[in-house]
């Protein structure tokens, strides 16, 4: 069966340039006229009432109205069945629109059963609403994600961080309806939400990793029509440290060594995130060799801890006194070491 295009503006008797208030007033006027409880012709009034509700369901919501306007009169040119969708007899097919969607993105998709075929295929199911009534469906608020810069010391020990975020919240003037005293709410301009600055205290757990998400329940965008709010997710970005690098739960420290320390061995003090430790440089240490200090990395699960890896970097003097140069020349003559053999 061919899907018939629905001109929702014509159904409500408004122009395409109509404001949200114009659409709402037109709907209320027609809804009173065709309400099944007051109309004499019950059957006709029920069908008309459902049609009015369907039109208001789309035009009364900014996002759906935008998608509907994007379809336009030539909507069929970008309409096709979703591959593999709706093969069962009596089942509802899923379709996709391949024309430009809101924000210039491609491919918004809807499916389900409910009002007209046109509405079902482009604007989803009407489940959760009584037939014949424009009853708003509650929706959970959108989750919000932000970047949280964490220092290596905070990751090591954990702590409490105060953060400030700007976000949307339910308008206190209209309670999220967008309407106050039968007029567009002046505080939110009909959006039902306002932008506010909020402060939060966030617990940074010891051993947090780069890229890990910290969840702050209930601090995302507010829900629609009384729905629960979304959550705030803070994605950890590890701040660069002047002395250490981090790989997973392990910490790396580059240790500069004199040539004779690498050759003869030495005891050297190196910093860690919990104080300095003395480590033994074994004789014959090579440039780039890693020396492990167990348990001096980041906290892991339970009692598990990462390690500290000291990476040797043998440094060669750039300037020599005459006496030093003489000693190196004696070493060069007497040494049997050949780096290229």
Image: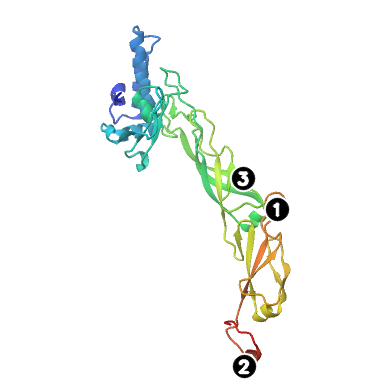
Residue 201: give its label: 3
- What residue lies at 60% left-to-right and 83% top-to-bottom? 317
Return the disc, 3 or 1, that comes first in the chain's sequence: 3
Comparing labels 2 and 1, the label whose residue is closer to the camera: 1
Residue furthest front in the image:
341
Task: Say if 188 sits above or below 26 in the image.
Answer: below
The residue that disc 1 covers is 304
Image x and y of residue 97, in percent: 34, 35
Decide: few, some or many residues near mark 1? Use Cα within 10 Å; few <14, some 14-19, many ≥20: few
Q: CA distance from mark 3 to mark 1?
A: 27 Å
Res. 23 in view: no
Mark 2 vs mark 3: in front = 2
Instruction: Give the x, y percent position of residue 272.
Output: 68, 64
Question: From where the camera sits, is residue 130 visible?
Answer: yes
- Earlier residue among tags 2 and 1: 1
Residue 158 lies, in percent from the top left, at 66, 52
Look at the numbered discs 3 and 1 and tell me whether their residues touch, using CB distance below 8 Å.
no
Q: Quadrant of the C terminus?
A: bottom right
Q: Earlier in the sequence, mark 2 or mark 3?
A: 3
The quarter of the rendered structure image containing the N terminus is top left
- Any mark on residue 271, and which? none
Provide the secondary structure element on which disc 1 rests: loop
Residue ID for mark 2? 322
Please tell me in which quadrant of the rendered image residue 296 appears: bottom right
Q: Is residue 110 above or below residue 315?
A: above
Q: Mark 3: give few (<14), some (14-19) or many (20+) Cα within 10 Å.
A: few
**Closest to the observer: 14 or 271?**
271
Q: Nearer the viewer, residue 289 or 177?
A: 289
Residue 237: quarter of image:
bottom right
Q: How far apart are the alpha carbons under marks 2 and 3? A: 62 Å
Q: Secondary structure at mark 3?
A: strand
How many C-alpha atoms fall within 10 Å of the one at disc 2: few (<14), some, or many (≥20)? few
């Amino acid at each position: 069966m061919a899907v018939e295009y629905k001109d929702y503006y014509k159904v409500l008797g408004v122009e395409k340039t109509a404001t949200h208030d114009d659409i709402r007033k037109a709907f209320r006027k027609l809804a009173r006229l065709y309400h099944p409880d007051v109309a004499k012709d019950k059957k006709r009034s029920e069908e008309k009432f459902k049609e009015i509700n369907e039109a208001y369901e789309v035009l009364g919501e900014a996002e759906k109205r935008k998608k509907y306007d994007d379809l336009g009169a030539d909507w069929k040119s970008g309409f096709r069945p979703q591959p593999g969708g709706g093969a069962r007899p009596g089942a509802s097919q899923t379709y996709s629109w391949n024309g430009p969607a809101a924000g210039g993105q491609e491919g918004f998709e809807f499916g389900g059963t409910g009002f007209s075929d046109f509405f079902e295929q482009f604007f989803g199911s009407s489940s959760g609403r009584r037939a014949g009534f424009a009853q708003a469906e509650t929706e959970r608020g959108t989750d919000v994600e932000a970047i949280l810069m964490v220092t290596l010391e905070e990751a090591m020990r954990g702590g409490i961080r105060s953060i400030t975020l700007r976000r949307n919240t339910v308008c206190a003037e209209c309670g999220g309806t967008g309407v106050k005293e039968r007029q567009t709410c002046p505080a939110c301009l009909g959006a039902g939400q306002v932008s506010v600055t909020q402060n939060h205290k966030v617990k940074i757990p010891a051993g947090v990793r780069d890229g890990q998400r910290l969840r702050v329940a209930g601090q995302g965008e507010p829900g629609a029509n009384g729905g629960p709010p979304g959550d705030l997710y803070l994605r950890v970005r590890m701040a660069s440290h002047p002395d250490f690098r981090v790989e997973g739960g392990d910490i790396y420290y580059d240790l500069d060594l004199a040539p004779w320390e690498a050759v003869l061995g030495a005891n050297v003090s190196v910093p860690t995130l919990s104080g300095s430790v003395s480590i033994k440089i074994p004789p014959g240490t090579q440039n780039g060799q890693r020396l492990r200090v167990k348990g001096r990395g980041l906290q892991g699960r339970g009692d598990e801890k990462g390690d500290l890896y000291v990476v040797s970097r043998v440094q060669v003097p750039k300037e020599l006194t005459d006496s030093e140069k003489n000693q190196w020349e004696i070493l060069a003559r007497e040494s049997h070491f050949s780096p290229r053999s």
